[in-house]
Image (cartoon, rainbow, N blue to C red):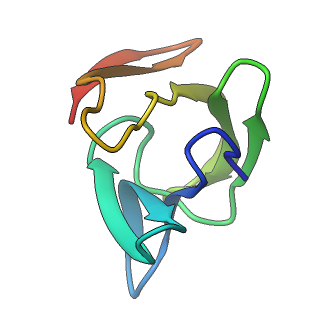
Amino acid sequence: WDTLNQALWIHGGFDGMACQDMWRFEQLTSTWNTVAQSGPSARYDHVAAWDGIHSMILVHGGYDQGFRRDLWKFEVPLVTSTSTETKTSMTSSQTTTSMTR
């Protein structure tokens, strides 16, 4: 749980096929927003952890036509009522991808 932004962050999953997108649920408005549609490969059965000290999500492993052993970090932007930082990054020990919102 992201206490600073009052939000829940989710990456990937399975809805008939593996998903690659990142979503944020905003508690104050009870709305879901797409944050990114790139980064780690589309996957499911992965694990994610919230690092509240560094405001980042760590995504590890999962399945995407094969078992993954990679670790990604998503640095969460500070969301305010008037603005949102526009650049975030998601990195892996193997790949770096820049995302804009």
- Tag count: 0
Q: Is residue 74 visible?
A: yes
State left or right for residue 59 relative to residue 12. Answer: right
Task: Name which residue lies at 21% across and 36% down.
Answer: 101
Residue located farthest toward the bottom when viewing the structure as drawn: 16
Residue 79 found in image quarter: top left
Above or below, comparing residue 32 to residue 43 in the picture: below
Q: Is residue 69 visible?
A: no
Q: Nearer the viewer, residue 64 or 84?
A: 84
Above or below, comparing residue 101 to residue 32 in the picture: above
Task: Name which residue lies at 23% across and 24% down.
Answer: 86
Give residue 94's position: percent from left, percent from top. Answer: 51, 14
Q: Nearer the viewer, residue 38 or 86?
A: 86
Give residue 93's position: percent from left, percent from top. Answer: 59, 12
Residue 59 found in image quarter: top right
State left or right for residue 70 relative to residue 79. Answer: right
Residue located farthest toward the front when viewing the structure as drawn: 82
Give residue 38's position: percent from left, percent from top. Answer: 29, 40
Task: Name which residue lies at 47% across and 63% down.
Answer: 26
Give residue 29's position: percent from left, percent from top. Answer: 41, 72
Above or below, comparing residue 30 to residue 21 in the picture: below
State left or right for residue 13 relative to residue 1. Answer: left
Above or below, comparing residue 68 to residue 85 in the picture: below
